[in-house]
Amino acid sequence: DAGVTQSPTHLIKTRGQQVTLRCSPISGHKSVSWYQQVLGQGPQFIFQYYEKEERGRGNFPDRFSARQFPNYSSELNVNALLLGDSALYLCASSLVISRGHPQYFGPGTRLTVL
Amino acid sequence: AQSVTQLGSHVSVSEGALVLLRCNYSSSVPPYLFWYVQYPNQGLQLLLKYTTGATLVKGINGFEAEFKKSETSFHLTKPSAHMSDAAEYFCAVTSGGGGGADGLTFGKGTHLIIQP
């Protein structure tokens, strides 16, 4: 079975632009979460979605938004890009929304903001 | 709020030696704990998890971890290091927020170096 897939792999944008990142969860998984990993740091939680509803949000500004589609895939949008938004953006899926169920990560999208 | 502290940003061991990566957590609720490994330019791969029950947890690739509530620790070990174990290792705890929010709180990671 395919794991979590993300697109694009790499992306270069300039300050002030907007970006959309995409994620497809493991087949049968209904929850998708997004994380930001700045170079040299651990991932930081941005959002969690379950059954198309936002179920959790980390400490990120309103420039960050996301949505989940009926097929459980998800998009992360970032508006008004800043240099500090340069990072690896990771998507993770889990079967259900439960603390005990592990999250499985995709390979990430590397975003560079110039 | 939850937090994770990984002691040692870099750990170097010889091939065949014991691997010990330290993780201490802080949690206001009973924690669910995870170890992930990240190889260069890749996403995170789940090594093992602790939810409830047995405190010694076995994972993939010969790794195991022991949950010690009294020490608020969840250290990762492997009896004999292999060159392929060289990677970044992350300890994580669930946030366990209201409404079932299940965001993970990660430590800053430990870079494991294997000396031949």
Image (cartoon, rainbow, N blue to C red):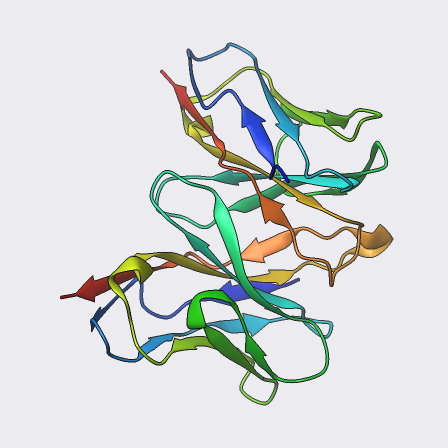
Give x and y (percent) for residue B76.
Answer: 44, 74
Q: Residue at x 46, y 21 (%)?
A: A82
Left or right of A88? Residue B25 is right
B41 up-or-down from B79: above or below: above
Give x and y (percent) for residue A83.
Answer: 40, 23
Residue lying furthest front in this view?
A: A1
Question: In this view of the protein, can residue B74 be seen by the observer?
Answer: no
Give x and y (percent) for residue A1.
Answer: 64, 40
Residue lying furthest bottom in this view?
A: B70
Q: Quadrant of residue A86?
A: top left
Left or right of B60? Residue A41 is left
Q: Residue at x 84, y 31 (%)?
A: A52
B33 up-or-down from B90: above or below: below
Query: In the picture, which quadrant includes the C terminus of chain A?
Result: top left
B61 up-or-down from A52: above or below: below
Question: In this view of the protein, can residue A44 be seen by the observer?
Answer: yes
- A80 or B112: which is nearer to us? B112
Q: Residue at x 15, y 66 (%)?
A: B115
Give x and y (percent) for residue B52.
Answer: 72, 77
